[in-house]
Image: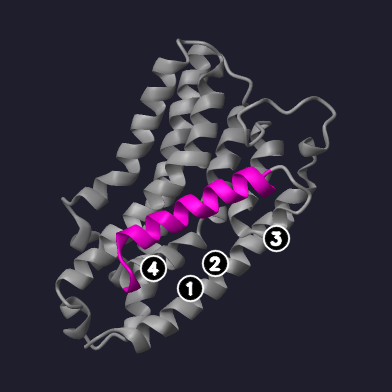
Amino acid sequence: MFQLIHSEKLKMSRSFGSYLPLSAAALQVLISLCLSMGTAYYSVNAWNWWYTMILPGMLAVLCYLTMKKEKKQHYANMLTTPIPPEQCLTSKVLYCAAKLLCANLLIFFGTAAGGMLIGTSIPVLNGFAAALLLTVCYLWEIPLYLMLSARFGMFASIFTCMAMTIGSLVALGASKLWWICPASIPFRLMCPVLQIMPNGLLVETGSRYMSAAVIVPGVMLSLAWFVLLTFAVARWFGRRVDY
């Protein structure tokens, strides 16, 4: 599997998709630094804007660009090897997951460095935990976006991303029913970890949103969705590819 992931890296090398995750994260850090005018809200804004707006859209575009290279060549790269298409699809999922982790870690290092210079209410360990949790909580979207990109194209992937993000943010982000929709899980988990509400306001002291009891169920639900969707999409892809 490691060789398959490395081959995905070679396929995407020197392409826009290869630079997109880190470029989006770096741009987010720079924009937040400029708009916060050097105040302590720099880290708060950077994290909140990242996981509520930039990260979901970046992930949808990354998945589309990853699948576009295969569709453009009529899946020739997959057909020239004896490796089952299901494994090839799984390697794409893991490649995008690695890119997602790198982008989240860049946000962490950027906010941690800026926080040391400007000041922040977000401890370094909480920021590191947020980077890992956001990676886990967004993993399930990768196979979904790959499937939508392969079946319908970029518009379906990005539209689904916007609908899920806005819907879960408005309706379930701070609701007791956050666990129903997997897209609302990262919004809820960031409340106790970063002490930021989905709307960008700081969590009040003593609020029920400060409870860390939601973290383990949120992680377990996200991983369950990830495993289920990866298995289902890989099976679908193995039968659906137009040879």
Q: Whole-Å distance between the Cαs marked 2 and 1? A: 6 Å
Q: Quadrant of the C terminus?
A: bottom left
Give the residue type that dot 2 points to: Phe
- CA–CA distance in space, label 1 to label 3: 19 Å
Tell me the kind of residue under disc 1: Thr
Query: Residue 37: x percent and y percent?
Result: 45, 10
Q: Which residue is mark 2?
A: 226
Q: Which residue is tagged 3?
A: 180
3D distance between C-alphas at marks 4 and 2: 15 Å
Label 3 is placed on what type of residue?
Answer: Ile
Residue 230 circle label: 1
**Label 2 crowding class (10 Å Cα cut-off): few <14, some 14-19, many 20+?**
many
Q: Residue at x 48, y 26 (%)?
A: 111
The N terminus appears in which quarter of the rendering? bottom left
Q: CA distance from mark 3 to mark 2?
A: 15 Å
Q: What secondary structure is the stretch in magenta mostly built from?
A: helix
Categorize mark 1 by other alpha carbons within 10 Å: few (<14), some (14-19), many (20+). Answer: many
The relative height of residue 8 versus residue 130 in the rendered view (above or below) is below
Instruction: Assess whether mark 2 and mark 3 are in contact (beta carbons under 8 angstroms).
Output: no
User: Residue 81, percent across and down?
Assistant: 20, 84
Residue 1 in view in this figure: no
Whether label 4 touches label 2, CB < 8 Å: no
Q: Give yes or no for residue 85 being in the magenta stretch.
A: no
Image mark for residue 148: 4
Does residue 164 show up magenta in the picture? yes
Disc number lying in front (3 or 2): 3
Label 4 vs label 2, nearer the camera: 4
Question: Which range is magenta?
Answer: 151-173
* Quadrant of res 204: top right
- The image position of residue 183, as x and y in percent, is 58, 54
The residues tagged by marks 1 and 4 sit, at their Cα atoms, a distance apart of: 13 Å
Counting residues from the N terminus, which is met first, the one under dot 1 or under dot 3? Answer: 3
